[in-house]
Amino acid sequence: MNEQHIEDIISALYDMIQDARALPLGADKCILERDKVLDMLDEIIAQLPAELKQSRTIVESRNELIGQARREAESIVREAQEKAKELVAQEAIYLEARRQCQEMYNKTQARIGELRKASNEYMDDALRRTEEAIAMSLNEVRDTRTKFRALTESQENRASETATEG
């Protein structure tokens, strides 16, 4: 018998049984060629281990491929989770740095305001003291001038009295 696939042999057996002549008084029994049926069954038995082995190899290969794909998928998921954690950590660092920067900016602005106020108060006080000092100096100059005029007039009066006396 030729090397046929098991399915073909089983199909041929099925056809042989269906086409076989029925026994008289036994519609569900038939006559078959024993040697031919036995040869076909031997062929099935001979091919069965090879096909089973082949199917097992295919199943093992499929399982190995599925396992490898699963491992790769788990690795990809793990890497994605790690990357996500890194990004979240970087985002947290960025947000913290931004918060600190804003805090420093606010403190700096407040300090600038304080310094501006203090310098304005200092400048106003310095100008007030300068104004007071100038006013005092002006008053002293006026007093001195008044005294000088009085002294000058008194000396002129004495000189004119001495000139008239003499």
Image (cartoon, rainbow, N blue to C red):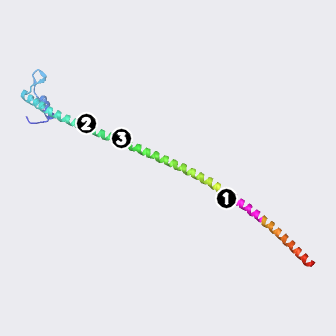
The front one of 163 and 129 is: 163
Mark 2 and mark 1: Cα distance apart in space: 88 Å
In this rendering, the answer to whether 39 lies above or below 76 is: above
Where is residue 112? Give x, y as percent. 60, 54
Quadrant placement of the N terminus: top left
Return the disc, 3 or 2, that comes first in the chain's sequence.
Answer: 2
Question: In which quarter of the view is residue 36 placed?
Answer: top left
Q: 143 above or below 48? A: below
The range drawn in magenta is: 125-138
Residue at screen point 67% across, 59% down? 123
Q: Mark 1 points at which residue?
A: 123
The numbered mark, 3 or 1, whose residue comes first in the sequence reads: 3
Q: Name the residue under label 2.
A: 63
> Residue 116: where, in percent of width, then height?
63, 56
Q: How far apart are marks 3 and 2 (CA)?
A: 22 Å
Choose the circle earlier in sequence order: 2 or 1: 2
Q: Name the residue under label 3.
A: 78
Q: Is residue 166 magenta?
A: no
Q: What element carries label 3?
A: helix
